[in-house]
Amino acid sequence: MFLVVGLGNPGREYEGNRHNVGFMTVDALQRSEGWPAFKPKFSGFWTKGELGSHDVAVLKPQTYMNLSGESVQPAAAFLKVPPARVIVVHDEIDLAWRDVRIKSGGGHAGHNGVRSVIQHLGPDFVRVRIGVGRPAPGFSGDVADWVLANFAAEERAELPDVLDTANAAVRAVVTDGIAAAMNRSKTKNRGPRNGGPGNGGAGAGCS
């Protein structure tokens, strides 16, 4: 079994935030696969289904972003899913908008949701990183304000394609394996990337 985790903050006020693109991705996956509706468990909402020949559980932690690991770890333990089969989907400011990348292991780069998962599960899980870019010129606020703001109108128009790309990455990890999925991701995503060191608090969630 695989465990696919979409990161985000619960509550209607956060639904359209860039920081909630992980929630958006797994919602789209559940709808497209026709899986059962999400139900409460593991301090979150979860459902399950199949991708190819593999059983897949999907989780949306409801702990707020910076406590995500408190939902992910119990789910992984109960379902007996090792870290290498946990796929965490999250926003990434150091990737340009529309860029989707797969990564296995590593640090948190300032993302508080990923930081929390590492604290509770260790670093050896898979990440599907969805680029939201850094603040646009003229944006009034810091990086935390940027990711906790809603997608702009132009981004919202492109969002369904981005979610499709992210879910194609999830499917590839599950059905083809991490190495093949990463190679495919690198080939398909060669757009410009927003520079700058670190992640500048991209994970600044709400507690």
Image: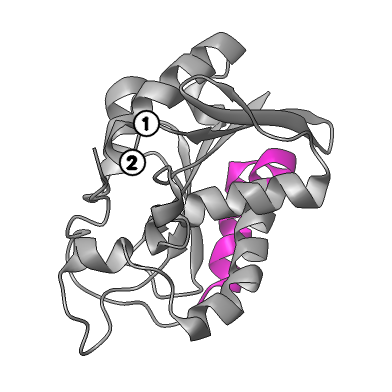
Magenta region: 171-190
Is there a contact, CB below 8 Å, between mark 1 and mark 2?
A: no
Q: Where does residue 182 sit, x and y in percent of width and height?
A: 56, 54
- Image quarter in which the N terminus is found: top right
* Residue 178 forms part of the magenta stretch: yes
Q: Is residue 56 visible?
A: no
For the point 23% across and 50% down, which residue is it? 204
Residue type at tag 1: Thr
- Image quarter in which the C terminus is found: top left
For the point 68% across and 54% down, which residue is it? 28
* Vertical placement of residue 178 versus 3, above or below: below
Residue closer to the observer: 43 or 174: 43
* Marker count (numbered): 2
Q: Where does residue 39 sit, x and y in percent of width and height?
A: 64, 27
The residue wearing badge 2 is 65
Report whether 121 appears left or right of 172. Answer: left
Which mark, by number, is residue 63? 1
Circle 2 packing at 10 Å, graded few (<14), some (14-19), many (20+), is many
Residue type at tag 2: Met
Report whether 98 appears left or right of 8. Answer: right
> Which secondary structure, mark 2?
helix
Report whether 126 appears left or right of 172. Answer: left
For the point 46% across and 51% down, which residue is it? 12
Q: Quadrant of residue 70?
A: top left
Circle 1 packing at 10 Å, graded few (<14), some (14-19), many (20+), is many
Distance from the alpha carbon under mark 1 to that under mark 2: 7 Å
Residue closer to the observer: 95 or 106: 95
Q: Quadrant of residue 56?
A: top right
> Which secondary structure, mark 1?
loop
* Residue 47 forms part of the magenta stretch: no
